[in-house]
Image (spheres, grey):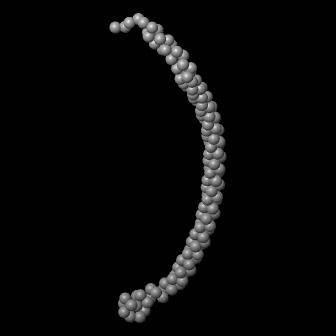
């Protein structure tokens, strides 16, 4: 059972004094440290957000430059391809014309050789006919 005497009053005074001492020595410094830490964290968070925004803007700028450079490279590549195709077509046409001219020349040579051979054979046709007939008949004509 609790008795009401002077020790109860002394204990209450001890608790109150202890509260003030702990508040000044322990609670206030801990709260100050927590508040400072919270302020520092919010400052760091705002700094991180600022850095992230800056990085995002720089990334967009780099992406724009890359797109522009890619477009220029594609245009240069298309131009080079077109020039190569044009040069190839020109060269191919020249080669085809050269081949066609060579073909016509060879055909003319072959026709002249055929005509010469035909004339030569035509002139000897009677001699061949007589020789063949004599061989077939086995007597001279």
Q: Position of residue 69 (x, y in %)?
A: 64, 45
Vertical relation: 58 (above or below) 92 = above
Tell me: 5 left or right of 1. right
Image quarter where the C terminus lies is bottom left
Where does residue 83 sit, x and y in percent of width and height? 65, 54
| Frontmost residue, 121 versus 64 | 64
Residue 5 percent coordinates (x, y): 42, 6
Task: Count up the numbered dots.
Answer: 0
Identified at 36% across, 92% down, the residue is 138
Residue 4 sits above or below residue 81 on the image: above
Is residue 60 shown to the viewer in this render? no
Image coordinates for residue 100, horizontal then vertical, percent = 59, 66
User: What residue sits 53% from the left and 79% below the top?
Assistant: 118
Does residue 16 appear left or right of residue 47 in this picture? left
Q: Residue at x 36, y 90 (%)?
A: 137
Residue with the most extreme bottom position: 140
* Image quadrant occupied by the N terminus: top left
What residue is at 56 percent from the left and 80 percent from the top?
116
Q: Quadrant of residue 24?
A: top right
Check the image and name the residue furthest to the top.
4
**The image quarter in which residue 135 lies:** bottom left
Residue 108 versus residue 29: which sits nearer the camera?
29
């Amino acid at each position: 059972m609790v008795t009401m005497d002077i020790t109860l009053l002394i204990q209450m005074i001890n608790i109150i004094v202890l509260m003030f001492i702990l508040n000044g020595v322990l609670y206030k410094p801990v709260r100050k440290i927590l508040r400072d830490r919270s302020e520092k964290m919010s400052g760091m968070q705002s700094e991180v957000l600022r850095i992230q925004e800056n990085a995002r803007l720089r990334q967009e700028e780099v992406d724009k430059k890359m797109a522009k450079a890619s477009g220029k490279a594609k245009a240069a590549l298309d131009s080079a391809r077109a020039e190569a195709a044009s040069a190839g077509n020109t060269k191919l046409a020249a080669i085809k014309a050269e081949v066609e001219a060579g073909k016509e020349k060879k055909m003319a040579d072959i026709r002249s050789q055929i005509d010469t051979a035909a004339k030569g054979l035509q002139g000897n046709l009677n001699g061949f006919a007589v020789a063949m007939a004599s061989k077939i008949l086995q007597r001279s004509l």
